[in-house]
Image: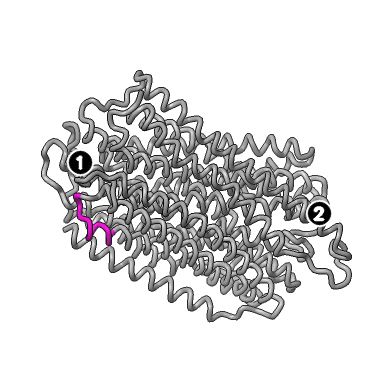
Amino acid sequence: MDTFAAILTLALAVGALLYAKVAFDKIMAKDDGNDTMKKIASQIQAGAKAFLVTEYRMLAVFVGIVFVIIGVTGNAEGDNGLGWMTAIAFVSGAIASAAAGWFGMHTATRAAVRTTQAARSSLGEALDISFASGTVMGFLVVGLGLIGITAFYMIYGAENLNSILGFSFGASSIALFARVGGGIFTKAADVGADLVGKVEAGIPEDDPRNPAVIADNVGDNVGDVAGMGADLFESFVGSIIATMLLGFALTRMDGGEFNKAMVAYPLLLASIGLVASYIGIFRVKTDDESKLHSALFSGLVTASVLVVIGMAILTLFFDVSYTYKDVAYTKWGIFGALVIGLSLGVIIGKVTEYYTSEHMKPVQEIARQSQTGAATNIIAGLATGMASVWLPTLLLALGIFGCYEMGGIYGISLAAVGMLSTLGISLGIDAFGPVADNAGGLAEMAGLEPEVRKRTDSLDATGNTTAAIGKGFAIGSAALTALALFSTYQVTAETLQGSQFEMLINNPRVMIGLLIGAMLPFFFSSMAMKAVGKAAFSMIEEVRRQFREIPGLKDGTGDAEPDSARCVEIATKGALAQMIAPGALAVLAPIAMGLIFGAEALGGLLAGALVSGVMMALFMANAGGAWDNAKKFVEGGAHGGKGSDTHHAAVVGDTVGDPFKDTAGPSINILIKLMTIVAVVFLPLFIKKGI
């Protein structure tokens, strides 16, 4: 049964890669515009490539070092989950994650100029190209993830599922550095372009005179395409592997017989989600500006409904019922848990939309408060971000309760897989946003007719909303994935240490872990925010220098051209130098806690980081999204429109929110997952350790 599921999953995963190739070829066959558009697009493509090449070279050193550490740490019997099998899986996960980010970014930077050209004649065709680019990213992530998981499962077998966790560890490592590094790059460029260009020089957004504009467009791709793809890639593989491992461990506890269906079930869920995503793609069609968002949402809902139907049919034939600690869980209860997880992702996304959409009251209130200056704008934005936390948290809590009641810890883990099962289309909906944003920038820089910019702005506005929804979805999936991995940690620790392992709140070691774990997301966010500030400082100085020293640049007279390559170089160096410390914190903190205080304290650290991390991620992502769309609401003509004092205040708020929503906030997702994976992988070293 598990072999059948693995073969089917592998075949569908290969099909996903074939779809990505066909979609990419169709995009490349489209017209890429005039010579000016091609020149600008080539600068963005070159900048994105240069950044990722430099970043991946640095990460190759890190991956090589960790590969050796994991390999030599394994014992001679190979029964502690470490060793060269885990090390090979680790390297493979890192390569797969990097490959998904690379090809997704490669596609996005080429789709943007073709979206711009398509927008000269049709909004519908522009949507087709930009959305197709997003689905290339989505199907690459799902295809590469499933190929890696199933290939290692078929080679290693169920008895070595601990070693396959190395694949998730590798993916998480790349994801964190990609998210942090890409986030620092894009926000350093964005802050420099906005503060000097819009506020100081008074020139429009994406004006070709601004030397930071190219770097800003590069950042959209390395941060919101490669970074987001890597983030959800590791959530996807982490949730599946954790569920498979739990399925194996739960049926073997207390001398039980191995139930292969519990290992196969998450693989089949991911497979059905892949097919459902493919069908849902065909629902995303419209030429009506007012129906852009509903067309995208229709595709996601269609895919979600098909997953529920498909899994209901499969559950008829798969017995995934089990007993844990004298409580029996039925297969239909477990099916109910995955439905909860799938629904939860959609609902949290809609809640996020309420707090971040320019059409909703919270964002419009921030815009209104901007009439009295930047201070009241920032106060309103912070308040909105804080208020946005309560409902998603309550939904997560109720969802976890329902999943546990229906399916136990296996049900919670499967809910994470359910939430991510439609990743092929949900990531496509999210990743089309940066393409639309770049398309608008290209239209402005190439001096195209106003109708083109109007169409790309419609796509961009929809993309901003879907990006905010995507961040909410990523946070929700991160919470469930981390909880799934935490359950794996607990079950594995109970297996290794027996009844001696107890994570009780009155245990001083557990309390120490809880406090330190709750602190880490704050410290990590501080490091990320300071990194953006340092990189942005250099960018601002460079833009000011060019406006000051290049004759005619600021006024747009003569043949003066900005030195955009210099700004890309500054953003690249700043991002890569500043990403090391936050990345090291995520890997070293759980190892240090486990070695010093033991496995119980490490469990406390993971729990504390999960709770405070989810709160911080929701707050920062939603506050940043609300500030961004409040600025766009003003730019649409509200409260004085562009150039007014209200607009200047809104730009300042948006600038504060940039590192919130695109650097620190989304990186916390990966922080809590990576620390949990590190804890599970190295757990054998922490048993009966500590002072």
Residue 16 image point, x, y percent: 37, 68
Considering the image in quadrants, where does the N terminus appear? bottom left
Left or right: 560, with 345 as reference point: right
Residue 681 in view, yes or no: yes
Task: Tell me where residue 457 sits by quadrant.
Answer: bottom right
Q: Which mark is residue 250?
A: 1
Task: Tell me where residue 381 sits by quadrant.
Answer: top right
Tell me the residue at 21%/53% (across/down).
Answer: 315
Q: Mark 2 points at which residue?
A: 544
Measure how far apart labels 1 and 2 are at the Cα level: 61 Å
Please report contact status of discs 1 and 2: CB closer than 8 Å, yes or no. Answer: no
Residue 20 image point, x, y percent: 43, 71
Left or right: 460, with 504 as reference point: right
Quick one: label 1 or label 2, which is nearer the N terminus?
1
Q: Is 156 covered by the magenta stretch? A: yes
Q: Is 99 covered by the magenta stretch? A: no
Question: What secondary structure is the magenta-colored segment mainly?
Answer: helix
Tell me the residue at 52%/55% (across/down).
Answer: 58
> Relative to 598, is 568 above or below?
below
Q: Which of marks 1 and 2 is in front?
A: 2
Q: Is mark 2 on a helix, strand or loop?
A: helix
Q: What amino acid does circle 1 point to?
A: Leu
Q: What amino acid does circle 2 point to?
A: Arg
> Relative to 33, is 222 above or below?
above
Residue 333 in view, yes or no: no
> What segment carries the magenta color?
150-159
Q: What element carries label 1?
A: helix
Residue 329 image point, x, y percent: 20, 39
Left or right: 367, with 514 as reference point: right
